[in-house]
Image (spheres, helix red, strand yellow):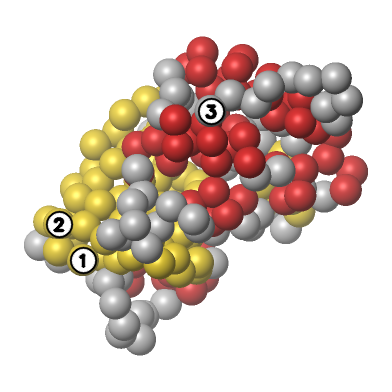
């Protein structure tokens, strides 16, 4: 679905259409369900008032306290790789904006949103996720989050390797998750998932 530019279309709707046409489509994000959701959800509602005018630019937007809303292309690629369905119980680890969770909400059978701190805490049981989506780049997958994923469940996230961030997909294998990096792209880093720094001499 492409937004149609019509007389009287407000500036944010025009910017949303431009985002889809010049950022998503030109970079291979063309799945109809992704285009539809990103055309429906107003990014400007997920940034500080002072940043509403740049909500659709091809860059991350600081939200304060070390958090950020990733560039539109990051969310488009995450959503296209994840392909959440009505059969999926989805966990979204929120990067601080709530935007990715809102994109996913009507596509999933059920949705649970966790902060990075909640994702690091031990699970209290309940239904395991068929799909986990992480709104940010992580250095490592903590056991506490892997345990929330069903056997053969899938994960889509940003991944940090040697200081480079990329979109990556993964599958639950045994007690851990095996990742496949797909495409390098700038993604805000979630420091809560950094590897512990060892001593150096």
**Other-residue count near label 3 (Cα within 10 Å), few / some / many at <14 / 14–19 / ≥20:** some
Q: Position of residue 175 (x, y in %)?
A: 15, 65
Q: Is residue 174 left or right of residue 85?
A: left
Tag 1 secondary structure: strand
Check the image and name the residue furthest to the front: 7
Label 3 and label 1: CA atoms lie apart by 32 Å
Q: Position of residue 123 (x, y in %)?
A: 35, 80
**Precedes in sequence: disc 2 or disc 3:** 3
Which circle marks residue 1 in the picture? 3
Check the image and name the residue furthest to the bottom: 124
Looking at the rendering, which quadrant does residue 97 occupy? bottom right
Which circle marks residue 150 in the picture? 1
**Other-residue count near label 1 (Cα within 10 Å), few / some / many at <14 / 14–19 / ≥20:** some
Give me the residue at 89% from left, 43% from top: 50
Tag nearer the camera, 2 or 3: 3
Q: Is residue 105 left or right of residue 177?
A: right
20 and 77: which is toward the camera: 20
Which circle marks residue 72 in the picture? none
Which circle marks residue 152 in the picture? 2
Label 2 and label 3: CA atoms lie apart by 32 Å
**Precedes in sequence: disc 3 or disc 1:** 3
Q: Position of residue 9 (x, y in %)?
A: 83, 27
Query: Do we see residue 49 in this rendering?
Result: yes
Query: Do we see residue 165 in this rendering?
Result: no
Tag 3 secondary structure: loop
166 and 161: which is toward the camera: 166
Label 2 and label 1: CA atoms lie apart by 6 Å
Q: Are marks 2 and 1 in contact (CB under 8 Å)?
A: yes
Give me the residue at 35% from left, 44% from top: 82
Tag 2 secondary structure: strand
Give me the residue at 70% from left, 29% from top: 16
Tag nearer the camera, 3 or 1: 3
């Amino acid at each position: 679905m492409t937004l149609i530019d019509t007389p009287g279309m407000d500036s944010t709707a025009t910017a949303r259409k431009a985002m889809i046409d010049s950022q998503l489509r030109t970079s291979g994000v063309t799945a109809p369900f992704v285009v539809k959701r990103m055309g429906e959800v107003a990014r400007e509602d997920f940034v500080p008032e002072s940043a509403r005018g740049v909500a659709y630019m091809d860059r991350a937007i600081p939200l304060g306290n070390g958090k950020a809303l990733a560039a539109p292309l990051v969310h488009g690629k995450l959503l296209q790789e994840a392909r959440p369905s009505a059969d999926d119980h989805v966990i979204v680890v929120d990067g601080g904006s709530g935007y990715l969770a809102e994109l996913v909400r009507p596509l999933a059978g059920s949705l649970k949103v966790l902060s990075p701190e909640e994702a690091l805490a031990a699970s209290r049981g309940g239904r395991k996720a068929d799909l986990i989506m992480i709104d940010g780049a992580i250095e490592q997958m903590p056991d506490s989050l892997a345990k929330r994923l069903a056997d053969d469940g899938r994960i889509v996230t940003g991944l940090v390797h040697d200081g480079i961030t990329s979109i990556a997909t993964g599958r639950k294998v045994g007690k851990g998750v095996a990742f496949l990096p797909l495409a390098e792209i700038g993604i805000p880093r979630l420091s809560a998932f950094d590897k512990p720094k060892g001593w150096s001499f």
